[in-house]
Amino acid sequence: GQNIDQPTEMTATEGAIVQINCTYQTSGFNGLFWYQQHAGEAPTFLSYNVLDGLEEKGRFSSFLSRSKGYSYLLLKELQMKDSASYLCAVPNSNYQLIWGAGTKLIIKP
Amino acid sequence: IAGITQAPTSQILAAGRRMTLRCTQDMRHNAMYWYRQDLGLGLRLIHYSNTAGTTGKGEVPDGYSVSRANTDDFPLTLASAVPSQTSVYFCASSEKGSGANVLTFGAGSRLTVL
């Protein structure tokens, strides 16, 4: 079966850096997605990693280690608008996404 | 604006009633999906459709049915609602029905079954 674990909640300070971790177990690997979801809104796509290493997109970066079943999302120069839930997801063998429960990120001034 | 439209935004429903959640996309995406999101749980796939005319069961299909008569529309029906179906329902679409694809989500439909 497949399983995804991420911390339930994290708190960080405006202007700082935060790393949100995701560990997964999967019978095959077809990449890993990160989505952002503001309270009461729809999830929106942030990143997709299929190869090991760090991919940077502006203030957000995503890292993948396939051998460790591990990914993280790195958010730099935190802004209040980054307060949201961050969802980790991996496709199963049928390419249907299996989702983690999400990490609620609280940004304090 | 291109995207996914869901209706209703919110609904309170008596147990035993029939309810259809509507979903329409204008991006000409091949695949569409229905998820439910409950507090403390990840998004769970109810049903999906890889292309018009085909549907498949997801992780939690019991009590729900879908149809995909055309590319744009993918309604979700609860034949006889029960309180455990109280949830936020998200419709999503992706360009392709095969491979790992980026999903575009609708704004969600909040359903309360009493």
Image (cartoon, coloured by chain):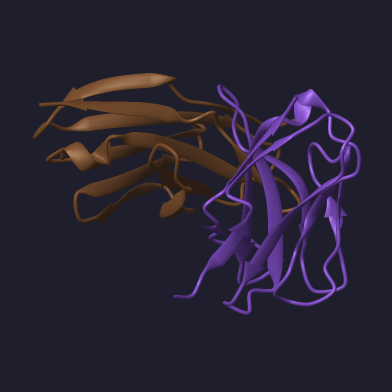
Identified at 80% across, 36% down, the residue is B60
Q: Is residue A19 left or right of residue A30?
A: left
The residue closer to the viewer here, B71 or A21, is: B71
| Relative image position of residue A10 (x, y in whole percent) | 31, 21
**Can you say which quadrant of the picture contains the C terminus of chain A?**
top left
| Chain B, colour shown | purple
Identified at 49% across, 53% down, the residue is A50
**Can you say which quadrant of the picture contains the N terminus of chain A?**
top right
- The reply to whether residue B15 is visible in this rendering is yes
- The reply to whether residue B100 is visible in this rendering is no
In this view, A37 is above or below B14: below
In this view, A86 is above or below B102: above
| Relative image position of residue B57 (x, y in whole percent) | 85, 48
- Residue A26 found in image quarter: top right
- Chain letter, colour brown: A
The residue closer to the viewer here, A43 or B50, is: A43
| Relative image position of residue A84 (x, y in whole percent) | 34, 36
Q: Is residue A22 left or right of residue B93?
A: left
- Residue A13 found in image quarter: top left
The residue closer to the viewer here, B58 or B23, is: B23
| Relative image position of residue B3 (x, y in whole percent) | 52, 69
Identified at 59% across, 77% down, the residue is B26
